[in-house]
Every structure is written in C-alpha cells, then in structure tokens.
Image (tube, helix red, strand yellow):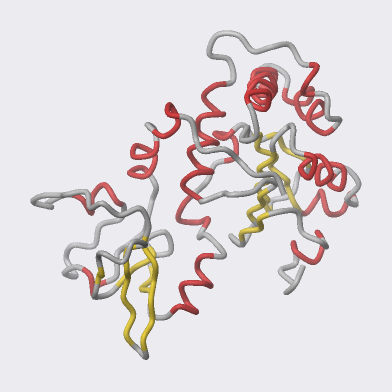
C-alpha cells in the first residue's frame, strides 16, 4: 500500500469547518436532556460556556472489567464517564464495540458525496463504492486494472466512485489537479486517463481549475484517518485499507476478503 504525506497547511485550515458541517445524528439521551438532542456538532457546541485545548495528541480507550475510560497518549489525562462515537450516534460500551465501529462509517449519517470529491464513476449501479487512489501509486494502478476487468453485471450493481487523492508527492498533486481540471469539462476523458494510467501526460491545470475537489478529498481523507492508498469504502460503510484480496468477496461482505 502507498503511504500518504501529512495534509498540507492549506488543507489543515479546512478541517474545523468540514468537521462542524458533518451530520452526526442525534446524541444519546444519557448525554443530554431529552429536550436537547443536537443533530450535529455545531448545535452541540451551543451553550458551552468555555473551551480549552489540552496538550493531548491522542487518546486511547481502556477497559477494566465493565469500566471503560479514556487515557491521553502521554498518560497525563484520564477521562471518565460515557464515551460516544458521534459519527454512529452510539455509546462506546466496550473495546470490542469500539473496534467494530472503527472498521466502518455510517454513510447515511455522514453523507459523503463523491461528486464533491472529484469522483470519476465506473459502473452505473446504485450501490456506491468510494475508492481513493493516488495517480502515482503502483498498488492503486493495479486495483484500477482489476476494476477494468470486473464483469458487466457487477458494473450494473455497483458504481465505483474513483476519487483522486494526491498524497505521495508534489507530482501526485500536479497529476490529480490536471485530472480534476479535465473532469470539469470532459469526465469520460478524465476517467479514461485515470484507468489507462495517462495522468502524467495531461495538460497542467492552471488557475484554480480542479483545486476545490482536491482540497475536499484531502480534508475528507484526514478526517476519516486514511493512512494508506488505495482506500475503499463499501456501500454498507465498511472500510478497507489496501486493495481487497478478493474484490467480489469483499463487496459481498464476506469475512477475510
């Protein structure tokens, strides 16, 4: 699998805005009065009297018997009380439950729009598969070659939304920009260039052409914690880092695919 770089500074500036816009679903009644169940993070923030950023770079979930609590990565802070996965709208009651939720997202709540991320569609099916790829990633190229050979029946069931995610180098960013710029006027031509590995021969993007989709894709990847490409999200929200060994089995949700 190909390893991405850290998001550029311009991308990091967008993180808070996008985070506040993510629909997070109702907060559980145990965490708020029944007459105050905010539907997103922005409304959850209303009424908070103050906020301070703690010197915490990460948090680990710990379980001792039936008790679940959270400890900062440096061991300085411990957080007691109920914890919630706001993206699923569920209380974290055990390590096993947290692990299960970590391996998927609730697509009906997050509503990731492939078209906003510069997706190029392969197939016409209603079941959407998001596929993040870097134009210069060899493993991504191999996965694209596999997708070109999937049966026609599969393409009528699924729609593979190929999202350029430039994480490997400056060259990746230039090729992804050129690809997205072309897609603004010629989506079939952009799809063909990606599938045929011709992104290095596309005319360079000028001005702001293609930049919006690239920025949104990078921010989304950061929020989702994408650490490898290719990265796939199944129609049912299952997350797959790296190409599945058996694509058909993975699409069907079979264990070990």
**Res 26 quadrant in image:** bottom left
In this rendered view, identify the residue nearer to me: 54 or 253: 54
Query: Percent from the top left, x then y, of residue 56?
Result: 30, 54
- Which quarter of the rendering shows the C terminus? bottom right
Image point 49% across, 49% down: which residue? 111
Query: Percent from the top left, x then y, of residue 237?
Result: 58, 60
Q: Residue furthest left?
A: 49
Query: Percent from the top left, x then y, of residue 85?
Result: 39, 65
In the rendered view, tell whether residue 235 sits above or below residue 75. above
Image point 45% across, 78% down: which residue? 95
Query: Percent from the top left, x then y, of residue 108?
Result: 50, 56
Q: Is residue 30 left or right of residue 231?
A: left
In this rendered view, identify the residue nearer to me: 16 or 227: 227
Q: Is residue 43 left or right of residue 201?
A: left
Q: Residue furthest bottom?
A: 65
**Res 168 quadrant in image:** top right
**Res 10 quadrant in image:** top left
In the rendered view, tell whether residue 72 sits above or below residue 144. below
In this rendered view, identify the residue nearer to me: 183 or 85: 85
Q: Is residue 93 left or right of residue 76?
A: right
Q: Is residue 59 left or right of residue 37?
A: right
Q: How many marks?
A: 0
Q: Residue furthest top?
A: 206
Image point 51% across, 65% down: which residue? 102
């Amino acid at each position: 699998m190909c390893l991405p770089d850290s998001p550029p500074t311009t991308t990091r500036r967008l993180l808070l805005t996008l985070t506040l816009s993510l629909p997070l679903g109702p907060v559980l009644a145990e965490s708020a009065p029944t007459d105050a169940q905010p539907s997103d993070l922005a409304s959850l923030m209303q009424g908070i009297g103050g906020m301070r950023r703690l010197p915490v770079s990460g948090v680990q979930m710990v379980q001792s018997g039936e008790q679940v609590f959270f400890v900062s990565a440096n061991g300085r802070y411990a957080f007691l009380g109920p914890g919630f996965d706001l993206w699923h709208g569920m209380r974290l009651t055990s390590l096993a439950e947290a692990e299960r939720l970590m391996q998927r997202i609730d697509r009906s709540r997050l509503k990731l729009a492939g078209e906003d991320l510069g997706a190029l569609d392969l197939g016409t099916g209603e079941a959407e598969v998001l596929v993040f790829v870097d134009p210069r990633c060899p493993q991504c190229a191999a996965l694209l070659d596999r997708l070109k050979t999937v049966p026609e029946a599969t393409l009528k069931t699924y729609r593979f939304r190929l999202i350029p995610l430039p994480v490997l180098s400056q060259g990746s960013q230039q090729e992804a920009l050129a690809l997205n710029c072309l897609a603004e006027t010629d989506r079939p031509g952009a799809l063909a260039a990606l599938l045929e590995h011709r992104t290095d021969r596309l005319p360079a993007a000028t001005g702001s052409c293609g930049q919006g989709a690239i920025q949104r894709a990078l921010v989304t990847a950061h929020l989702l914690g994408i650490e490898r490409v290719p990265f796939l999200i199944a129609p049912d929200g299952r997350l797959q880092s790296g190409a599945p060994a058996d694509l058909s089995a993975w699409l069907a949700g079979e264990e070990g695919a």
